[in-house]
Image: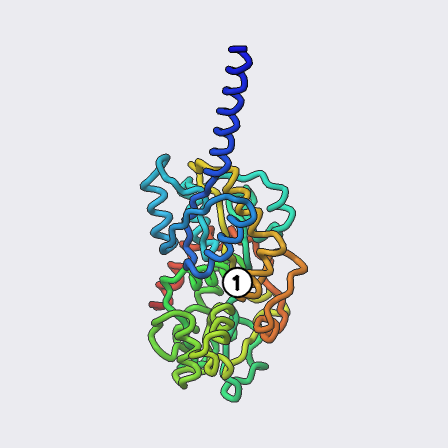
Amino acid sequence: MLSKRFSQTSIALLLAAVSGWVQAAEVNVYSGRQEELIKPLLQQFTAKTGVKVNLITGKPDELISRMASEGRNSPADVLISTDVGRLYRAQQQGLLQAIDSPVLTGKIPAHLRDPGQQWFGLTVRARPIVYVPGKVDPSQITKLEDLADAKWKGRICIRSSDHIYNQSMIAAMVASIGEEKTLAFAKGLVANFAQPPKGGDRDQIKAAVAGVCDIAIANSYYLAAMHDDAKDAAIAKQVKVLWTNQADRGAHVNISGAAVAKHAKNKAQAQQLLEFMVDAESQRWYATTNHEYPVLEGIAWSPVLQSFGTFKAEQLPLEQLGKYNAQAITIMDKAGWK
């Protein structure tokens, strides 16, 4: 009888322990994305799986430095970044680990993920030309390189060279056309600036509408978000999108992406979260709510994105944006791009 009671008690304690472990399942996320742009999706993940998400947001480079300083004691399980360049930096610092996931490799195109499976694209972010109709004849611009032509002197707005979006754009050019041609382009582009670079992508679009310039270079989701913003919608409607390099390499694209941290204590939940982010429901949320292009095929774009038109995107393996980042920065410095 004693043995039976002991056995029953042991089973009860084991079940209680297992139940407690399931309830305590969690994943710690360091996110370079603003909370409002990622938290709703993380809440959906918790509702679906029961896994609690502990979210810390901040500037991507600061989060990477934090992970490095924390070392093995870092609580981070997942790193989410707004650009492949930062994921590459984290990888080079040994802060990430490879994930063997047929789900991720099956759903995400090869050029949008690390060949070694250490980081994965969750959405595609395009960086087209935004122009003011009536002031710009779009037939005069077929390539990004055309913006170096003297006819655009004093007519171009773009943010500073210290931002990763522009560094990645130039790095993509280095990978595609070489350093010499990219330097010539950068010098011509800088000569055509309407003003010293300042502000973010939305500010470049606003400057174009205000008459400061005729052309802005900005990520498409910023313009799309302006269409949803009551105070900016009227401004957004005064510009159009132009897709460059459609006859050759395609328009420049980047990703928002994620990776599992090297010292993740909750690796299984971390992988589960990444796989959740590329399922059809999550990809639909990204496309309709955040106006980003899904990595998963067959997902409809938001009406605003559809209004920008279809386009041919670069197929460049995105690890090259990280590989050529240093060269890109050197070229921008030589061109006088502040």
At a point 51% along the width and 48% down the height, the residue shown is: 46
At a point 36% along the width and 64% down the height, the residue shown is: 334
* Residue 305 point in image, percent of width and height: 58, 71
Q: Quadrant of residue 72?
A: top left
| Residue occupying the far right of the picture | 298
Q: Out of 252 and 147, give the one closest to the viewer.
A: 252
Total count of labels: 1
> What is the secondary structure assignment of the residue under circle 1?
strand
* Residue 200 point in image, percent of width and height: 39, 69
Label 1 sits on residue:
125
At a point 65% along the width and 47% down the height, the residue shown is: 106
Q: Out of 118 and 306, give the one closest to the viewer.
A: 306
| Residue occupying the far front of the picture | 1
Vertical placement of residue 177 versus 120, above or below: below
The answer to whether any part of residue 37 appears in the image is yes
Vertical placement of residue 29 versus 165, above or below: above
Q: Out of 271 and 208, give the one closest to the viewer.
A: 271
Q: Out of 163 and 34, give the one closest to the viewer.
A: 34
| Quadrant that contains the N terminus | top right
Colour pattern: rainbow
